[in-house]
Image: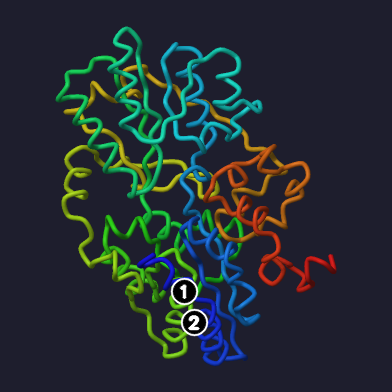
Amino acid sequence: MKYVDEYRDGQLARDIAAAIRAEAHPEREYHLMEFCGGHTHAIFRYGIPDLLPDNVRMIHGPGCPVCVLPINRLDAAIELAVSHNVILCSYGDMMRVPGSRKRSLLKAKADGADVRMVYSCMDALKIARDNPSREVVFFAIGFETTTPPTALVIRQAQKLGLKNFSVFCNHVLTPAAISNILESPEVRELGVLPLDGFIGPAHVSTVIGSQPYYYFAEEYQKPVVIAGFEPLDVLQAIRMLVRQLNEGRAEVENEFSRAVTYQGNEQAKQIVADTFELRRAFEWRGLGVVPYSALRIKSEYAEFDAEKRFMVEYRSARENKACECGAILRGVKSPRDCSLFGDPCTPENPLGSCMVSSEGACAAYYSYGRYQERVFASDGASAAEQ
């Protein structure tokens, strides 16, 4: 298959890995963060840690939209379904994320709430058209990749004159999260995180382009290499970062040039700008309150804003004290550092969002455990030795 098979060639992977080992200076450490949860899963699925030298360490970032949504926002969605008797439409990953008091959308559904899993926001719009006597709310989450479809569905609802459809908007922004990791005193107080460079997200960058990352290269002197999700993409991005660090450079490079341009998708960005505006602040699980890091629906589309239509209230909610999901999202801990990991917290019985999502670090580590040894064994021993 073109643009897939050629990026999974085993011999080429070994050749790139050999080049990384040759270029990585043995006297220094390389701490590289893959921001996107899709990259985290690719790294473990293809056993990339086993191909890297010990001094090149991958750190998992907060690029999992299901994982970073705080409990109080999830609790609000559950309350919409339970107390306001709406049809709540949600992507599948959100259904099983535990909120406060161990509630989830799936449990609310089992208790009688009308919660429906959808594959796209257009599915939610169809449900609204098919049920004109019911209020339908789409639980919108995601980074810049899923924001344009939500904008389109809001505009389509206005065009159709649907009065029973609204959106609970929880869309968040990648650059703001990266800035928060690099400069927030609150995050630094929660754990020191050595970071030398970033693997930039793939899908997000197809929308926003490579331009936003130049700020991090220039302001923080952190190199960024945008990469695709295939194993050769990731390996080549790691090699490019190692080379930049060796040469004392901090630049933005685009390994994923077959899909990402400098300016991104101008039409998609314009639709988002016309439909949404920045929130002054938004809470992220693991990062706390991050300024200008999320979007809300503009006033001209206020009739489709579930937060305004239902006067959604947010109550303080505590995370599970034993769950290390917040620290994992910041990159200061790994799944093996969590006392709940594997027992009792599993994909079948998730106690934290990082184990639920298809982009969560805990789910990746659990699913592809045979590739974990080098990266996550904090004392340097192999998983077998532990």
Q: Residue at x 24, y 40 (%)?
A: 277
Q: Which mark is on residue 118?
A: none
Cα distance between the residues tagged 2 and 1: 7 Å
Q: Residue at x 66, y 28 (%)?
A: 102
Q: Is residue 98 left or right of residue 243?
A: right
How is the structure coloured here? rainbow
298 is higher (above) or lower (below) than 57: above
Q: Position of residue 184 (x, y in %)?
A: 47, 57
Residue 65 or residue 22, whichever sits in front: 22
- What residue would you read off at disc 1? 232
Look at discs 2 and 1 and give the one toward the viewer.
2
Crowding near pointer 1: few (<14 within 10 Å), some, many (20+)?
A: many
Give, as a three-letter code, the residue at label 2.
Leu
Q: Is residue 54 left or right of residue 225?
A: right
Residue at the far front: name it. Answer: 1
Element under disc 2? helix
Q: Residue at x 52, y 15 (%)?
A: 113
Q: Position of residue 141 (x, y in %)?
A: 40, 39
Element under disc 1? helix
Screen quadrant of the N terminus: bottom left
Residue 274, located in which quarter of the rendered image? top left
Asked whether disc 2 touches disc 1, contact meaning CB atoms under 8 Å apart, the reply is yes
Residue 67 or residue 19, whichever sits in front: 19
Q: Residue at x 34, y 71 (%)?
A: 219
Residue at the far top: name it. Answer: 133
Q: Position of residue 353 (x, y in %)?
A: 58, 42
